[in-house]
Amino acid sequence: MLVLTTLLVLAAVVKVRCLSNGLAMTPPMGWDSWNMFGEQINETLVRQTMDAMEKFGLRNAGFVYINLDDGWQHYRANRTDKPLEADPVKFPSGIKALAEYAHSRGFKLGLYGAPGQTTCSGFTGSEGKEKEDAALYASWGVDHLKYDSCCSHMFATKAQVQKVILDMSTALMNQTHPIVYHACHCGWQDVWEWAAVEGANHWRIGQDISDDFNYPGLRDGYYYDVLDMIDRGNNITKYSGPGHWNDYDMLIVNLNGKSTQLVGTGASNTEYRTHFSLWCMVASPLLIGSDVRYMDNYTVETLTNKEMIAINQDPLGNAAVKVADAYNGTLQSYAKNISDGSIAVALINRGTETVIMGTMPLIKDWNLSWPTYRLRDLWQHKDFGTLNSTYWVEVMSHETKVYQMWQVK
Ligand SMILES: *[C@@H]1O[C@H](CO)[C@@H](O)[C@H](O)[C@H]1NC(C)=O
Ligand SMILES: *[C@@H]1O[C@H](CO)[C@@H](O)[C@H](O)[C@H]1NC(C)=O
Ligand SMILES: *[C@@H]1O[C@H](CO)[C@@H](O)[C@H](O)[C@H]1NC(C)=O
Ligand SMILES: *[C@@H]1O[C@H](CO)[C@@H](O)[C@H](O)[C@H]1NC(C)=O
Ligand SMILES: *[C@@H]1O[C@H](CO)[C@@H](O)[C@H](O)[C@H]1NC(C)=O
Ligand SMILES: *[C@@H]1O[C@H](CO)[C@@H](O)[C@H](O)[C@H]1NC(C)=O
Ligand SMILES: *[C@@H]1O[C@H](CO)[C@@H](O)[C@H](O)[C@H]1NC(C)=O
Ligand SMILES: *[C@@H]1O[C@H](CO)[C@@H](O)[C@H](O)[C@H]1NC(C)=O
Ligand SMILES: *[C@@H]1O[C@H](CO)[C@@H](O)[C@H](O)[C@H]1NC(C)=O
């Protein structure tokens, strides 16, 4: 099922030949095992995760991908020495049975692989055996593949990385079972410029996120906090769209400093909610990275806010752009067009004090002449009626207000 389509790259207004599998027309949503559990995963954990995601309403809110990250494999070895198999102790029923179970519960199942002899954690890799592995994943009913070029290809040239990513994408597209393809390359070598052309449905825009809202400097020389990640995405939004997304990395909501893999001391409820708001605004994939078996009510309310999720999943697939930046980057507004003709706007206070921010300047920044408009607060789930002047609101330190605005004629 190899389909060639043309993709209009908006800003450049150039037509690029693009490999497309027709999948992920809205950003993928689900859970990934790595940040909380590392290699310590097993089928009991996965089943309990599905139970929790159903119980807390996450599945019905759209979080359907249950993605096993590194560590599901049997052998910590070079691929020339050992085959690619599931660990029989961690997954005694096998991946096929787990995928069938996931499907019966209304979920999808994702797996993790890597080019090269080994994955990042030293398990068997796929390079040179992409066709065999893609066929195996498809025969198991796997719905998503994170293909992580981290280790063996950290110092590879762009051409080498493009080749290994393309080899797997063409092998996946050759399968009749649809598999969403995450080409994970740590945001190196301007991956956003070429990954869609190579058939990727999403790609990371940076190295790993840390469990921090705003850590001064680059944490341990490697990890980006929430605000760094958002800033990194600012000038590459044009590369994101239906079927091919800039991925700002997994959600740190609910990690609370307990990740076994990430550095970071956690963030406040307000900061986690700002993080979620921003990921929704920029149309990032939404993959929860925490232990969803344990969540407080505030966290559940954050992650299952259907109005915010609708902004993330809007079929136009726009990524919000920064339209205002005041007081040295302390007060910022992001906006994006929504398919029903409205705009979604986020007012962010990155500073340390409560401030008053307004909506009308934002309409002007967005070059709209809307004398009257309807305003809805997507966190309070509250309508403010028809307004003809600026709506002013107090925004706490590190808080984000998200509104949807419709022109009233
Ligand atoms: C499965 O993984 C979880 C999370 O790492 C762990 O707490 C649990 O002990 C494991 N269960 C089995 C049966 O290995
Ligand atoms: C994998 O192969 C490389 C190169 O031959 C070797 O240095 C390394 O020790 C092997 N690793 C394992 C886990 O066998
Ligand atoms: C696609 O499948 C065909 C038929 O099984 C096979 O000959 C071909 O090598 C495959 N191509 C890729 C890229 O997997
Ligand atoms: C985005 O901004 C960064 C930092 O200023 C710069 O290095 C990079 O080239 C820019 N990318 C694009 C696509 O404009
Ligand atoms: C959390 O929500 C559940 C379900 O709505 C409710 O039964 C419970 O009382 C809430 N807990 C707290 C501490 O508010
Ligand atoms: C921005 O930062 C510079 C340098 O720290 C300072 O001189 C200036 O007053 C600041 N501007 C505003 C509007 O806060
Ligand atoms: C948003 O939509 C308006 C009205 O259709 C259009 O004029 C404007 O160019 C769009 N802006 C962006 C950044 O897409
Ligand atoms: C609004 O118009 C100005 C001036 O033409 C332009 O620089 C700016 O990019 C526009 N903003 C948006 C969001 O389209
Ligand atoms: C704006 O709305 C107020 C209150 O509804 C109304 O009294 C006023 O006439 C309106 N002004 C304009 C210019 O429409």
Image (cartoon, rainbow, N blue to C red):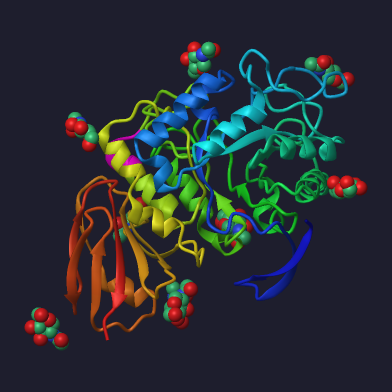
Q: Residue at x 83, y 24 (%)?
A: 79
The residue positioned farthest toward the front in the image shown: 104
Q: Position of residue 6 (x, y in %)?
A: 72, 70
- Side of 268 where 209 appears, left or right: right
Q: Position of residue 231 (x, y in %)?
A: 48, 52
Q: Quadrant of the N terminus?
A: bottom right
Q: Is 281 above or below relative to 167?
A: below
The residue positioned farthest toward the bottom in the image shown: 409
Q: Residue at x 78, y 44 (%)?
A: 168
Q: Residue at x 49, y 61 (%)?
A: 319
Q: Position of residue 235 (x, y in %)?
A: 54, 60
Q: Quadrant of the C terminus?
A: bottom left
- Side of 369 where 356 appears, left or right: left
Q: Which residues are magenta?
A: 267-272
Q: Is 324 above or below relative to 65?
A: below
The reply to whether the magenta stretch includes residue 189 is no
- Side of 242 where 305 appears, left or right: left
Q: Nearest the camera: 357 or 306?
A: 306
Q: Main secondary structure of the magenta part?
A: helix
Q: Is 261 above or below relative to 405?
A: above
- Side of 348 where 396 appears, left or right: left
Rendered image quadrant of residue 215:
top left
Q: How many numbered callouts?
A: 0
The reply to whether the magenta stretch includes residue 271 is yes
Rendered image quadrant of residue 368:
bottom left
Rendered image quadrant of residue 323:
bottom left
Q: Residue at x 42, y 27 (%)?
A: 291
Q: Nearest the camera: 26 or 369?
A: 26
Q: Position of residue 309 (x, y in %)?
A: 40, 53
